[in-house]
Amino acid sequence: MTWIVRNLWLIPALPALAAGLSALAKRHQRRFSASLAIGAMGLSFLLSLCAFSQVMLAIAHGQASRQVVNFPWFQFGDQWLKLGWMLDPLTAIMLVMVTFVGLLIFIYSTGYMAHDDNFTRFFCFLSLFAAAMLGVVIANSLLLLFMCWELVGLTSYLLIGFWYHKPSAAAAAKKAFITTRIGDLAFLVGMLWLFSQAGTLLFYDQGAGCLEHSALTAMVAHLTSIGMAASTGIALLIFAGAVGKSGQVPLHVWLPDAMEGPTPVSALIHAATMVAAGVFLVARVYPLMAAHSDTASVITATTALQVVTWIGAITAVFAALIAVAQNDIKRILAYSTVSQLGYMMMGLGVGGVAVGMFHLITHAFFKSLLFMGAGSVIHGCQEEQDIRRMGGLSKLMPITFATYAVGMLALCGFPLFFSGFWSKDAILHAAMGWSISRVPFYLGSLGALLTAFYMTRQVYYVFFGTSRLASHNEVAPATHAPHSTSATPHESPSNMTVPLVLLATCAILLGAIGTPAWPWFDSFLSGESPVFAFAGFLEHGILPVMLTSTLIVFLGLALGWWFYGRKPILSADRPDALEQLHPGIFHVLQNKFYVDELYEHTVIRWNSALATFSDWLDRWVWNGVVMSVSNLVLGLSWLARSTDTYLVNTSFDEGCHTVTTSGKLLARLQSGRTQSYLRMVGIAFAALVLVLIWSARS
Amino acid sequence: MTPLSSCLLLSSLLFSVGFAGVLMRRNAILILIGIELMLNAANLNFIAFWRYGSAPEALTGVMFVIFSIGVAAAEAAVGLALIISIYRHRKTTQIDRMNSMRG
Amino acid sequence: MTALSYNSLHHSSPQAADQIFVIVQHWIVGHAPVGLQPLLAILLSVVAIVGGFGLLFAITTILERKGLGRIQNRYGPNRVGFFGSLQPIADAIKSLTKEDIVPQTADKLVHLLAPILLVLAAFSVYAVLPVGRNMVLVNLDAGVLFFFAIGSVTEVAVFMAGWSSRNKYSLLGAMRAIAQMISYEVPLILSSLTVIMATGSLSTVSIVEKQAGYTGILPHWFIFTPWGFAGFVLFMIAATAESNRSPFDLPEGESEIIAGYYIEYSGFKFALFFLGEYLGMFAISGLAITLFLGGWNAPLPFLTWVPSYLWFFAKLLTLIVAFIWVRGTLPRLRMDQLMNFAWKFMLPMALLNLITAAVWHFMPAGPVRWLVSIVLVVVPYTVLGRNQMHKGHLEKRVYRFAE
Amino acid sequence: MLFTIFAALTVAGAVAAISLRNLVHSVLSLILAFAGLAAVYLLLGAQFIGFAQILVYVGAVAILIVFTILLTRNDGTFGHSSQASWNLGALIVIAVFGTLAWAIHSSTALHHAPPPQPEATMQQIGTALMVRFALPLEVIGLLLTAALIGAATIALHEKQERP
């Protein structure tokens, strides 16, 4: 066991320490708290790199790629509840991704939040979030994972509601918290069920962990009353937690609203890390998901994985459709995120851990790139978020534009040179070969088309054409950006652009580790040494899928150009090109399929009706009972008082008088002088000793 | 006179002197002094019985005295604080004037 | 139980120099009748202590006066003897021949007993100070406790002096002195407790022996550990307060209460007070040396041939010079600052230092232990220090009307 | 021999403490008694207790009493109780001492040869305090803390209420 494995806890502990220290910092100690947070994150990143290289070395030397450290937490009965952390390829890759992206976002935040009053608080929350997320990643126990998971939820709540003086932000924070809580409840139930089945919550514990062979076979064999294997039930419940966190249909509603938080938060939490936690969770418990009564090692589609696939596929298309009709730059990206998360889930369902995780990693880079680019745009345009009011920014903000374009092409899956292409391709290829149904493949392709289309639309709106910002500003003078000297958009400072450039580089380069010719990522996760072979391209079905997806991407880009790029968009108030084509559908899409309204009218109305009913119950039924009892008691007590006053008191007074007289006599003894008491004690003592000795003599 | 009985005699003498102080003086501080003397007499008894008694290796007597000294220190601190507090109210430390609780 | 354990001594030359006093004492005692030998041994040691430290007292007075003179840009005594070096003798003759004035209303007996008790108590504590190898009067099992117990008797002496003089300044000075001594006795004892925890012994001799040995050229003194260093600093601050020296010399602050509890003393009794104060300072410095600075151990491994008592006195002189320097440098504190400092800084620091020592004891040796211990010392120091600066009114004073 | 001297010193100090008219003299005599008792402890081989006695009683309790005396300006009536109750008190004290002395004198359990000096090194006391008596030690610590806070509160109380 190497040093880094034993001290893996340092990775989350450092940001947690930074959070604790910045919580103590005073409001004006901006530099202190920012450098603390960035320093801690940088150290964590270095440690993560150590951990990563450790895993690489282990694989290269053919050793076991998974190392765990477990320690007892507390005892109940004769059992020890154990917690622990582990280092395996999945953890290592996630650690590097989270710390690297996190570090860049921290740096970016110093620019983005520079004018905010609560700068130190922001960094405190951000560090705490990073700590919790890293805790999720290294946990070797479902319980520890759940604790960090909840901490992630809490910090997400705090960060979304960071500008809590805005009612919309406060509401969004609440919504995010409560919606994910629904999933977490299922997760908790699943966890308890798992504990009752497996007797442990450790993932890997030298054969005794809940994800290891013996426990899995036991759970598969255990059938519940409705004929479902226990493992399937548990897996589905845990998946429900992932659905909540990762914003899958039907619990996706919170994610777009969460864009009320500061943009770095959106980039960190709602693009790169927290939403990916759901995908990561599924990947982590993948053995449970894939547990099958056959002992064969071939991945067969279990019920749980089918559910994952379908939910993912539906989400991918559903969210992409909504994204087409949005006007808020961050909301488009938010729905895009939901859609891409759907892809990841689908990838996990159809292709296994490597496929889904590869897309998670590439997506983390380019989506945080896009969010930070959007943040840069928003920052440059005096907090304007409506893409219809932007335009022509490509010349004013060249670096932002270039990096944004890279991110957009990566997201669309532009062939060969961008990471998104390879990761999405892997998913589509796996979906094509799925044994149950071809429908996810078609849905995925449709999603890819829509992705290319809405991203083109957004880029045309934001960066091309003429600036429509000035006219807007004349109407409403910039009130919320008193620091800016001019109303024209400007490029952001270097501490915002440098992270963008770094991320853009990653978004391009990362594709190289997962091509069919050199499936490094795949073999890294499975703990093998990668082989380089061009023959990988010639494997069954790969080239057709690549060609198809390339065609789809180009079709999407072309459609986008046709609608938005052909003639420049002149006015902010002109209806959208699609809206002109078919207003009805556009409105449905713009209103997000009315899901919020649906929930409003079903779940929330039911809930408030129930609440009203219990209120009524409380007010009239229970209160009535209580009131009648109290009235009864009052009546009784009145009766008792009358008896007392007229019957008892008179005779009692007489008695009292007698007692007082005799009491006065006795009171002479109780003089209140300690010394006279002590005198008594002395006499009694002497007498007692005399009596004792005398009786002993005789 | 064995050493033990001479120790006990000293202790009982000390106790009686302390007791006399408590009984025969009216000043609260002097009464406290008397109490301290009585406590010390008890401590001496413990030490004497530890020294000359059986099983001295258990150190029970010594331990008891250590704790007794601790308690005595606490008692003295609180007692004197009370005396100061009472003095602030009634401008006296004579114990027979502190009789407002008398029935 | 005397230091003159009658064991065979090796008479090789460096050890002979080291043990010369012990050998001489043996030789003298050997001539006495057997029954009187232990008594004579003790008597000889007492004479040596009284003579040696009395001489040190004389040296220190002239050192202090000359040193303060240098610091204050004046000559200091320079009339008697060579550059004033015989000044102590002149002082002694003067104070012995002066009239002894006792106030008419004074409580004569108590007035007389106070300085005697003070000097007695001050000398008694030397019984447990090991001034050299095998050079301790009694090696008590509870030596440190004895030191503190006897040290607390000085409070009684001070009270007796202040109260019996029937002078409001002396009473005020006595009350101040007692309050200060009680307050600083707590951190004093707590900071020496770390050493007792580390050595597991209250015997001064075994504490010194535990500090023998070297790692490389670094001796195993407790001051070379984070808690030991913090403990030493705390101890020395508390010791300065215990011996009523500047900047903690409020009890005798001339400018406020003239001379504190010994206003009404003159002549020989005043000299006794003076002697008592200095002896107290030497004793507590000696305890600091014993606890933290390795006692009579040599600071470097190749210097062990130098006789051990020379090391002890070299360290003692260093500390005395430090005391003089501090006196010449720092201004006097206010009473509230003094108390705040004791209860809000010294006490928590000393308590935390106990924890640090425990952590040091239980952690495996290595750089991590150093790091943790240093953090445990530095962080509370910073926090408490800042807190004191802000709330303890220790910040630089702003004069509103003087400028 | 030594025992007799120290015992005489102790008793003399105690008697002086309760009979002197001046309170400060009383406390000084009390200190004498405490010191004598500490010497007796040392003679009995209880080194730790002896030094603790000096540290606590002489260094702390006596000083506390002195402080109290100075803080409560006495009105000069250091007098004894009334003659009748004084007589009664003396009688009772003599009775108590008489019975005690008689009990000690007549007890047969005490008449055996003194055992050899038992060991009570600091090491043993420390081990006993930390192992067997750890809980009482903590309780004492708690008690002292409570007493400290309580005493400070009681003594400070009035000062803050005063205008």
Image: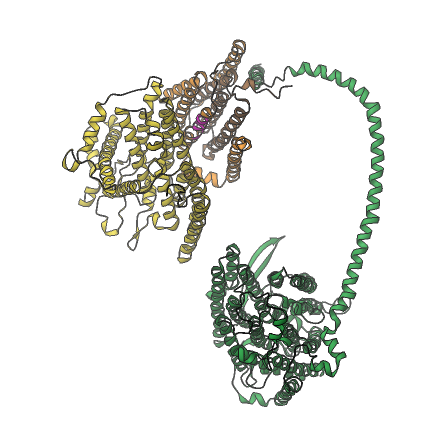
Left or right: C356, with A452 as reference point? left
Location of residue A243 by image quarter: bottom right
Give the chain ID for the orange colour: D
**Colouring method of the image:** by chain
Residue A267 image position (x, y, % from top left)? 58, 70
What colour do you see for chain A?
green
Whether residue A233 sits left or right of residue A625 in the image: it is left
> Which hue is chain C drawn in?
yellow
In percent of width and height, residue D46 lies at 41, 31
| Position above or below: A153 against C172 | below
Residue C190 part of the magenta segment: no
- Please state the horizontal and vertical placement of residue A251, each as a whole percent of the image: 70, 68
What are the residue bounds of the magenta stretch? D60-67
* Any part of residue A435 in sight: no
Q: Colour of chain B?
A: brown
Can you tell which quarter of the image residue C370 is in? Answer: bottom left
Task: From the viewer's perspective, tell me whether residue A643 is left or right of residue A36.
Answer: right
Q: Please name whichever residue, A82 or C241, is drawn nearer the observer in this view of the structure.
A: C241
Q: Is residue C305 visible?
A: yes
Residue found farthest to the left: C82
